[in-house]
Image (cartoon, helix red, strand yellow):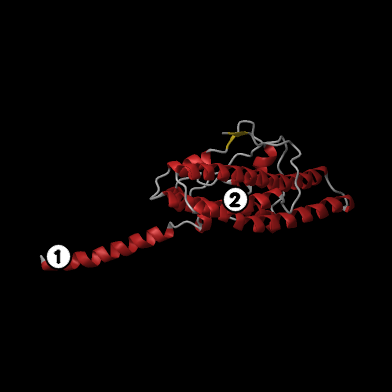
Amino acid sequence: MPDIIRQIRPLSAVLLTLLGAALGACSGGDFGRTRADMRSDDMHRWLGAEVTSSVGLKPSQFRLTDEERQLRDLAYPMIEPPLSRPAWKTVFGDYKPLPSPWRQKIVFDRTMYGRTLIDEPHRSHSSRYAQLIEDVRNDITRFEPFFASAIRVIDLDRKRDASMARVSALSPRERDDAVARMQENSLIVQWVQQCLEQRVSSYRWALERLVIQAPDGMAADADRLIGELAAQTANPPVAAQPPYGRAVVSKG
């Protein structure tokens, strides 16, 4: 029997080591993003096709530039609704395309975030406040990098537009693809702007419900951060007015 026990103990240590390595490999990225080994260079290319097709336009067939790829990579975390997927799906790299807000059947429900926050199991109401504060702070952190990227892309698109008149033997297909790419980029920026407006509305609804259900000093910090995000959202550094009308339909 002692010999058997000596054999089992090294085996158990090996199994624990392998299990730890497997769990470590499944860890998610910062801010709940899809883990690095689930990524590909053009994993967010679908954003352009989705946003143009939702307003009746054709997507560009041009390859993405590095700047355009970065714009889409930075846009996705701001488009995906917070608390839209369980934590275990975040850990195991869950990822799915999202519908454009210009889809006719898409209805924005400003209460969904707050109801999810309140209904999900938490150790205390303080942890709910902490989750809200973290989500708002993450959006504030993402704001500057995204719009810095948007400024570069929109500026390059202006140069692209100005140069087309001087391109020799420009084919109709090349022109159509160039115009389509500029439309894609602009619409993606507008998509993010709408999502930020929706998030501010959702965060405020959630905070109001937390305050009446469980008053806490953390509410002041949450309110301050929501106000900061609202001020940034109301004054984006890139002016991109939706040419197809507002897609937001709010309820609640």
Relative to 14, say whether 138 is above or below.
Answer: above
Residue at 78%, 47% in the rendered image: 178
Disc 2 marks a residue whose amino acid type is Ile
Q: Classify the position of the C terminus by image quarter.
A: top right
Question: How far is mark 2 from mark 1, CA to CA?
Answer: 61 Å
Q: Would you say residue 93 is visible in this rendering? A: no
The answer to whether 212 appears left or right of 184 in the picture is: left
Q: Residues within 10 Å of mark 1 (few under 14, many from 20)?
A: few
What residue is disc 1 on? 4
Q: Residues at badges 2 and 1 in contact (C-beta under 8 Å)? A: no
Q: Residues within 10 Å of mark 2 (few under 14, many from 20)?
A: many
What residue is disc 2 on? 226
Mark found first going from the N terminus, 2 or 1 = 1
The answer to whether 92 appears left or right of 158 in the picture is: left
Disc 1 marks a residue whose amino acid type is Ile
Residue 67 screen position, x and y as percent: 70, 57
Relative to 70, say whether 252 is above or below.
Answer: above
> Nearest the camera: 185 or 112?
112
Residue at 81%, 52% in the rendered image: 158
